[in-house]
Image: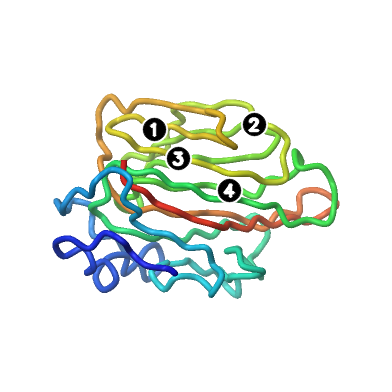
Amino acid sequence: MKMVLFKKGGFLLVLAVVLIGLISCMFFDGGNGTGPTPPPGTVLFFDDFEDGADPAWKPESVAQGQWVVKDGAYTIENAPEDAPLRTFVGDSTWRGYSIEVDIVYNTYGDNPWRFDNQVAIFIRVQDENNMVAFFFRTGGTSTLKIKKAGIWYEMASAGTPNVYGGHILITANGSTYSAYLNGNLIAEFEDTENSITQGYAGLQTAYDQSSFWSSMVAFDNFSVQAL
């Protein structure tokens, strides 16, 4: 069942008023809300994509490229090569929370380290110019970055195992951000300015044909939980 479990205050207004836009024909409300703080462990959002994508998602589209559900997972189709698409979900008042998601590389061959699908998991997205993201590259360097006033800053990075997929966990706890792959800490940093304190969650991927075989990434079991 896909539902928002935390119902205090006006939280269910999420379905009607937040995420009414981003990029082309979309915009954020700025992430300056002061809504109620849910107890730690509260599931704020969950989607297993078994019955399609939850309507709360706000996906981007480019030309014929779009977000779709295939084989019970969330991915993109018909997107131009190396043109990443993003999709966002949540509430501008989400503060301390974690994101968990399973990723799978759908490919016909080659080695994972050759893939560059521009995979990213976004956390505390305030607007187009202010957010935090974990950029994941299998077999390469994965990086935690923060975007302030439209400029990306690399905060922490590390080499990533050569895998065809796995379980990613991202946490935003106070001013500390951490990224894990299959239970292992990959990168962590502290935003000493504490400049981004709340915001939406999101995903990004791109179609990649940089090697002989083309590759796609699919996301499954996306969960947001209060910390």
Q: Which one is in front in this view, the residue at disc 3 or the one at disc 4?
A: 3
Residue at which label 4 appears: 119
Residues at marks 1 and 4 touching, judged by CB atoms closer than 8 Å: no
Callout 4 secondary element: strand
Q: Identify the residue shown where x is 67% and y is 58%.
A: 207
Q: Which one is in front in this view, the residue at disc 2 or the one at disc 3?
A: 3
Q: Position of residue 10 (x, y in %)?
A: 16, 65
Label at residue 170 = 3
Q: How crowded is mark 3: few (under 14 residues within 10 Å), some or many (20 or more)?
A: many
- Up the image or down, 40 lies above or below 70; here it is above
Q: Is residue 158 left or right of residue 39?
A: right
Q: Where is residue 17 in the image (x, y as percent from the top left)?
A: 24, 70
Q: Could you say which is closer to the camera, residue 27 or residue 200?
A: 200
Residue at which label 1 appears: 177
Q: Earlier in the sequence, mark 2 or mark 1?
A: 2
Q: Which of marks 1 and 3 is nearer the N terminus?
A: 3
Q: Which of marks 2 and 3 is nearer the N terminus?
A: 2
